[in-house]
């Protein structure tokens, strides 16, 4: 069983790949920016914020065709995206928790 640090590192790797996937897609990027309210020029800064990478994975998971295309293009099993989400800050199932 992997320790928490290595699980988080793997989760961050998947999330960074997902961000690159979204950023490279001329249809997904505008939708992502519209949903998040982030300007394209601010993505790099936003990526350092807690919860941003979890938000990228939530975006991928919210649309099954996008998830399946991401999985196919990166070789990541679709289930690994949800697992990665839960390993990231603010990516858990506890929606009642306030910061």
Image (tube, rainbow, N blue to C red):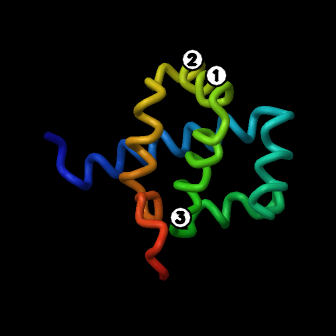
Question: How would you rate the neighbour count of disc 3 (Cα within 10 Å): few for under 14, some for 14-19, many for 20 or more?
Answer: some
Q: Which residue is drawn at 13% across and 40% down?
A: 1
**In this picture, residue 30 sits left or right of residue 80:** right
Question: How would you rate the neighbour count of disc 1 (Cα within 10 Å): few for under 14, some for 14-19, many for 20 or more?
Answer: some
For marks 3 and 2 on the same chain, the one whose residue lies earlier in the sequence: 3
Q: Do the residues labelled 2 and 1 touch (CB within 8 Å)?
A: yes
Q: Residue furthest bottom?
A: 99
Label 2 sits on residue: 72
Label 3 sits on residue: 51
* Picture quadrant of residue 70: top right
27, above or below 8, in the image: above
Picture coordinates of residue 41, whole percent (x, y): 81, 60
* Picture quadrant of residue 84: top left
**In this picture, residue 16 sits left or right of residue 69:** left
Q: Which of 37 and 74 is in front in this view?
A: 37
Picture coordinates of residue 44, whole percent (x, y): 68, 59
């Amino acid at each position: 069983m992997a320790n928490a640090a290595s699980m988080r590192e793997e989760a961050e790797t998947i999330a960074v790949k997902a961000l690159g996937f979204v950023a490279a897609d001329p249809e997904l990027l505008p939708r992502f920016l519209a949903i998040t309210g982030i300007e394209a020029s601010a993505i790099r800064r936003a990526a350092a914020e807690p919860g941003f990478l979890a938000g990228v994975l939530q975006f991928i998971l919210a649309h099954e065709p996008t998830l399946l295309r991401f999985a196919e293009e990166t070789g990541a099993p679709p289930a690994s995206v949800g697992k990665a989400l839960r390993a990231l800050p603010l990516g858990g199932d506890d929606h009642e928790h306030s910061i």
